[in-house]
Amino acid sequence: MKYHASLLSAAALSLLAGCSDTPSSPGDVTQVTFPDGMLWGSATAGMQIEKGLAATDWAIFSNESGNIQGGGKPDDGPDALAHVDADVGSMVDAGFNAYRFSIEMSRLYPTRESFDADIPIAAGVAAYDEVLAALKKQGIRPMVTLHHFSWPDYLSDPSKRKDPQGWEREDIVPVFTEWCRRAAKRWGDEVDLWVTVNEPNVEANVGYLAGVFPPGVLDVERAAAVMRAQVQAHARCYDAVHAEDQKDADGDGETASVGIAHHQRVYEPADPASEDDLAAAERSRYVWNLWIMESIVRGKVDDDFDGVPEKDDPMLAGRADFYGLNYYGPSRVDSRGLKFKYIGVVPAQYDVQNGRPKTDLGWDIYPEGFGIVLDEATAYGLPIYITENGLADEKDVNRERFVAEHLFELGKARARGADVRGYLHWSLIDNFEWAAGYCPRFGLLRVDYDDPKRTRTPTKAVSLLRDLAASNTLDRALIDALPAYQDKPFTCAGF
Ligand code: FCB
């Protein structure tokens, strides 16, 4: 296995060399700042917060018993489309100026016939018009995701999981491109920030290797095919959005700005003294963190994922105007684990015994890792938006410190050169957390699921974020005054 040294960030190289001067070194930084015009806000996805997306693969998947912890259904959630004004009002109260959400293809085109004839459901169009109008009224910039894990059921049907699904379908690139074109045409006057695909690597991994997202299979060839198709579809979607969205919606001098929301982790060797573990961790980092960005930014085609691109493709290169970064934490890579073609060993993410505090899902709380992935992102020379960062915190005991520590690392990364322009916390409200159902509470606003009105209550991090958004400054002393982390204060099984 060979990897180009040029792919490695300075931070990763220093880690591999055992150097202690990493971004996490305690320094004497006492204050960090955020740029003028910084976007502050939160992120959601339609399938996780809206009711009535019955014509989707996730609806089918959640109706099969055993797929969702606790048996929760997407329709049991916060019912966001019935709370638009209140939720946008909460964003205003939090001092936010941005909101990332998805527009769901299946709400507009619930059947293949409606898609082919381009006859969208009027109520679906009106629902998203209402969200965009409410945001506009409050001066909140929308960032719209065009695909956040869920497909209409005519493109992906987990009850037929042996058939090609979603990204595997022969027609998926033209179909997805057409979807992007229509969305950009319809909403380009209101939207400047577009995310084509949310976490392509996670969708491939969790759907086709862990088997806990649709289609629920374990097949590395299919996972690899999905990733190859995703970068093609993204690139054509990028072109389609630019072709249709010619209006500068927010007056910043630019029309559309298009990217992906890229899930990026820190891959740590189980034994830092083991050459094999170091190599396995580096392989994971290449496959999961770098491969996609190498494709869509630098046009590198590496179909066998071996770190040595076979060719350059000008139709892939330069297809990102910004780097959307989703960061949740690290994974441990143990070369003694089961090895797969293309990807090597599958990293472990849950309840790794390493002394770090854990969230309710057993994920490590590791703010320093945010600095490491931000340095990786910086190497691509693009503006960076944090499109997701958050934690499951049912008891509301860790979120304030988590947010403050992550933003402190973000501030330090900026000082090292990261052009970060926004922080969108995952999530605005508690929601349907995919295979983990309703146990994990990621919301800045807590949702009362026992109340038919789905009342929302702000968690403590809301006022913290409001102060940060107002001052664009964060003092280390503020973090030092916050309560220490509680280790895994509540238990939701990992998924
Ligand atoms: C990310 C997903 C998002 C949410 C968070 C917790 O991987 O993009 O929808 O599930 O994790």
Image (cartoon, rainbow, N blue to C red):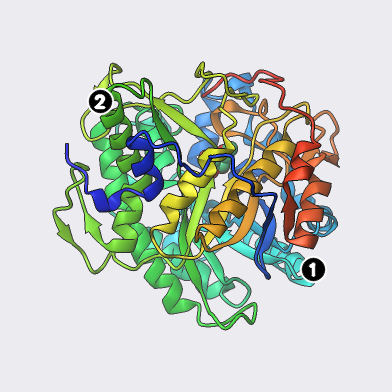
What residue do we see at 24% from left, 49% from top?
A: 5
Asked whether mark 1 lies closer than 8 Å to ligand 1, one says no
**Amino acid bearing label 1:** Gln
The picture places residue 413, in percent across and down from the top left corner, at 54, 53
Which sits in the foreground, 212 or 185? 212
**Label 2 Cα crowd, 10 Å radius (few <14 / some 14-19 / many 20+):** few
Q: Which residue is mark 2?
A: 275
Q: Quarter of the picture for ligand 1?
A: top right
Which sits in the foreground, 227 or 373? 373
Give the mark nearer the N terminus: 2 vs 1.
Answer: 1
Q: Determine the CA span between mark 2 and mark 1.
A: 54 Å
Is 231 drawn above or below residue 341 in the view shown? below
Q: Nearer the viewer, mark 2 or mark 1?
A: 2
The picture places residue 195, in percent across and down from the top left corner, at 50, 59
Q: Based on the displayed image, in which of its 4 quarters is residue 452 positioned?
A: top right
Q: Based on the displayed image, in which of its 4 quarters is residue 113 positioned?
A: bottom left
What residue do we see at 46% from left, 77% from top?
A: 244
Q: Which residue is mark 1?
A: 138
